[in-house]
Image (cartoon, rainbow, N blue to C red):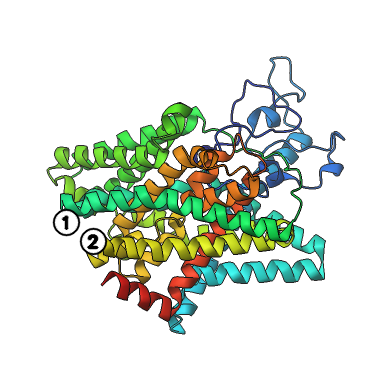
Amino acid sequence: MSIVARTLHPEWNFSSDQPVPPRLQATGRSSPDDSSALNDPEALVKRDVDSQPDGSGTMPYPGDRSALLSGGPRDGDGEEVHTGRSRQKESHSALAYLHWAAAIASLWLADKAVAKLAKSAHVDFPPPLIGMFIIIAGLVGSSAVSESGCQKIEAFFKPALVWIQRWLPLFYVPSLIMLPLTLNTINGVALTKILSIIAIGMPFTLLVTAQVAIVIRRISQTELEPAKPEAQLPPFSKVHHIAWGATWLVSLAGCALSSSAQVTRYASSSYMLASTVGGYLIGCALPAKLTAFLHPMITTACLANFSALLMGTLTGAGYETTLRGFLTKNAAQQGAGDLLMSFLGVVILTFGFKIFSQRRLMVRHAPEIFGSTTASAAFSIFATAFAAKAAGLAPELARALVPRCVTIALALPMAAALHAPAGICVAGVALSGLLGANFGQAILSRFGFRDPIARGLSQAGAAHGLGTAAIASDEPEALPFCALAYALIGIISTVLVSIPAVRGSIFAITA
């Protein structure tokens, strides 16, 4: 169990020679999708703390062996005597693992159940969004009936929410990894047009959203409350790098040496999964100045493609064949990319908890938030469609750029509804996010936008989750609005595209 826990939970300390503070404090790099309501890992194991036998009122963090094994009575040889107290702590640690697994499984099964029901009912709307709205409605209803009951529901799912946050980019990077195969079908002229539309569209979306927010702010005159400090998720540990590096080497050896086709297929999936996770770990470990323009998603995609080339060369299967096995979209022969993308629906479900946790902020600043996010979503969709048409871009490529300002978890369902290539869609979203994260704040300052609400909403409108991560450290007052707006803009955009009249107009514009 400890091996699995080391791999899945970077925030859990497994060191046996370091003292454990009485209260865990999360530190480290924040993910693009950070939210103050989801960033307290300590809540994962807060269970009846007042009844602890030592009277400390705090629980050891699950999996923390130093907390479980240090300080107990020892025999003459220095060996710890196993007591009822240590057994109780180990029991709580095991329960924390089961709690995490149950929370993840519940969300995953709920996503699949909603998708199955929507398909059987012939509902032309993204099933994960249906599930997200059900979660919001359920939380609102339970809160009205019993606030303590609602808090228990949130506490149950919190381990899953923290885990999804920590590994978020991995769930939508597979389409970016497959981008080289998609680009093979695009000529240089079309690629230049795509880059130009994204480069020009990002600042336009940024400034339009900011101006709409300012106009609404002047009308509403709602006072901005002081922002609460945001907690950050901890960095990955050396255990993760060692474990996934060893998996990569063993799987590569299995692919190269095995004579069984079935063993080779499983080893190949394990190898590409380790390549993807390892690339993300390396990307997160790079210096902050480097990750400002070399996002961990880009590092992940590059290293995964290198790994596909390496294995294709060693096995004789070739680069393209190996890479195609990563994301097959075939239920009978799923690759590592299919496994990762199966969590995309779960990612969208977690937006329901995020939106519910920010309900007070949404009510207080409803005109600014909903007015700006709706305007930003509509402007981005139609301005991109018209720009692509004016540039003479092929219809399917033009439609792939329409979700460029939407978080990838929702951009992919939009691309599917518009019959657009997923790889180009993901590349457009990633590039828009990187441009906004690097230049968005400077552009807003250059044009005189100082209001924190306008800056937060516009940064989310132009650069979604990457823009949110960019302002996390130096604009705390803008951060809550940015974190909320990037989810809302994705939801509003998806709802708009699901409307037949809007979808039909996009097809007509880009035809």
Query: Looking at the image, how many numbered discs can be counted on the residues?
Result: 2
Q: Secondary structure at mark 1?
A: loop
Horizontal and vertical percent position of residue 223: 76, 51
Q: Residue type at mark 2: give it.
A: Leu
Q: Quadrant of the C terminus?
A: bottom left
Asked if residue 93 is positioned above or below residue 421 in the image, the reply reads above
The one nearer the camera, 397 or 238, is 397
Q: Please indicate whether residue 478 sits to the left or right of residue 259 in the image.
A: right
394 vs 223, nearest the viewer: 223
Q: Residues within 10 Å of mark 2 (few under 14, many from 20)?
A: many
Query: In which quarter of the view is residue 152 placed?
Result: bottom right
Q: Tag 1: residue type?
A: Thr
Answer with the quarter of the image where residue 68 lies.
Answer: top right
User: Do the residues under discs 1 and 2 have CB atoms within 8 angstroms?
Assistant: no
Mark 1: few/some/many CA within 10 Å (<14, 14-19, 20+): few
Residue 81 lies left or right of residue 306; in this view the side is: right
Residue placed under numbered mark 1 in the picture: 185
Q: Nearer the viewer, residue 478 or 337?
A: 478
**Numbered mark located on residue 8 in the image:** none
Calculate the distance from the C-alpha at mark 1 to the C-alpha at mark 2: 14 Å
Image coordinates for residue 67, horizontal then vertical, percent = 70, 30
Residue at position x 42%, y 80% in the image? 501
The x and y percentages for residue 433 are 43, 47
Using the image, determine if residue 170 lies above or below residue 116.
above
Position of the N terminus, as image quadrant, is: top right
Can the viewer see residue 178 in this picture?
Answer: no
- Label 2, on which residue? 393
Labels 1 and 2: the sequence-earlier one: 1
Residue for point 74% across, 56% down:
221
Say which residue appears at 86% left-offset and 43% top-offset. Answer: 51
Give the residue at the far left of this rendering: 316
